[in-house]
Image (cartoon, rainbow, N blue to C red):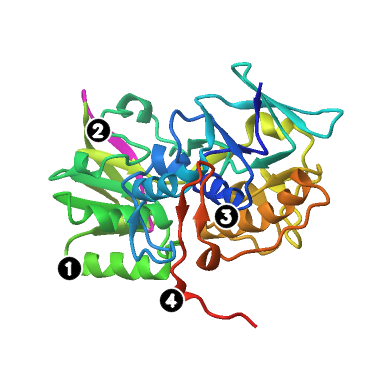
Amino acid sequence: MIYSDILIIGAGPTGLFTVFEAGLLKMKCHLIDALPQPGGQCAEIYPKKPIFDIPAYPEILAGDLVDRLMEQIAPFEPGFTLGERAEHLEKQDDGRFLVTTNMGTRHCAPVVVIAGGLGSFEPRKPPLENIANFENKGVQYMIRDPERFRNKNVVLAGGGDSALDWSIFLAEIASEVSLVHRRNEFRGALDSVEKATALSKAGKIKLYTEAEVSRLYGDDHLEAVAVRFNHPEKGESYVETDFFIPLFGLSPKLGPIGNWGLDIEKNAIKVNNAYDYQTNIPGVYAIGDVNTYPGKLKLILSGFHEAAVMCQSAYQRVNPGKRYLLKYTTVGGVTGFDGSKKEAKKEVIQAIG
């Protein structure tokens, strides 16, 4: 049996930052994740993808963000159960929860935090007749190492942030980048749309709008794709390529968590955002992309905020009747469980009236 103050389901950025916020309150955390390493999608799917909306980082690669979070939480010595999926949740007579993984590992904690991102996920695949023949032979559903595409011809498909951001990124690496989108308007951030449009005018990205990839060609490896336009008079374009990367998002599934008696809405867990992101089961919280509430924004920084608020509530469950006085890290510094301490810089402290 593994005991902790807070058991975190999901070791993505939100789950990792929860360790830091809990550590400031002297609460010990343990994390469970089905992936073999911490970091969630940032580590498994797009470690080399740049992220632009992390405070104080104008740009940071997803994998580097995970590394910084791991460095930040190291003083608090979290435990990890990796490569295992949380299967069963049981409330014990003493009020604590027993969580058992698919490998039979048993965890016990008074607080359970679901920070599982989108849950288990699979890429959404375009309905192309022979696409399975080219998977890992030119057809890729995610980008782990952009260097693989250096000096190659690449066709991407999609209209969201991932398709735009990767097109922009690969424009400086690949020999030729083509982006195919079935509509004329993109769903991504306006800044990304403007950058992709500018690169298109500069000849670094070929934009095919109001079009779809309709066929794949090749023998042992992908050699070309057919791009069919929505307007019949435009016909089809034959585009030679080494890689086709459809980025249509992920199909999320909550998996076993969906059977825990939680209040679910559209494959997300409903929480009380007016107070502490608690679910309909007292003592079980949901933070990050896995939760839903009015006005929810699926951003990493939103998950960080939810983690900080949730930990204040969790402290009262772990330490009933004990009063906690909030101390700013600028004043008190950060003290790890091993006694190590990062002192606050006194010159930046301002009096708070």
Amino acid found under the numbered disc labelled 4: Glu
Residue 324: % across, % down: 72, 58
Q: Disc 3 on helix, strand or loop? A: helix
The local crowd at label 2, few if under 14, some if 14 to 19, many if 20 or more residues have their Cα within 10 Å, is some
In this view of the protein, which residue sits in the foreground, 79 or 89? 79
In this view of the protein, which residue sits in the foreground, 48 or 9? 9
Question: Farthest residue toward the bottom?
Answer: 353
Q: Disc 2 on helix, strand or loop? A: strand
Amino acid found under the numbered disc labelled 2: Tyr
- The CA span between labels 1 and 2 is 28 Å
Q: Mark 1 = which residue?
A: 202
Residue 42: % across, % down: 42, 44
- The CA span between labels 3 and 2 is 42 Å
The local crowd at label 1, few if under 14, some if 14 to 19, many if 20 or more residues have their Cα within 10 Å, is few
Q: Measuring 43% from the left and 69% from the top, which residue is drawn there?
A: 345
Question: Farthest residue toward the top?
Answer: 104
The local crowd at label 3, few if under 14, some if 14 to 19, many if 20 or more residues have their Cα within 10 Å, is many
Amino acid found under the numbered disc labelled 1: Ala
- Which tag is nearer the camera, tag 3 or tag 2? 3
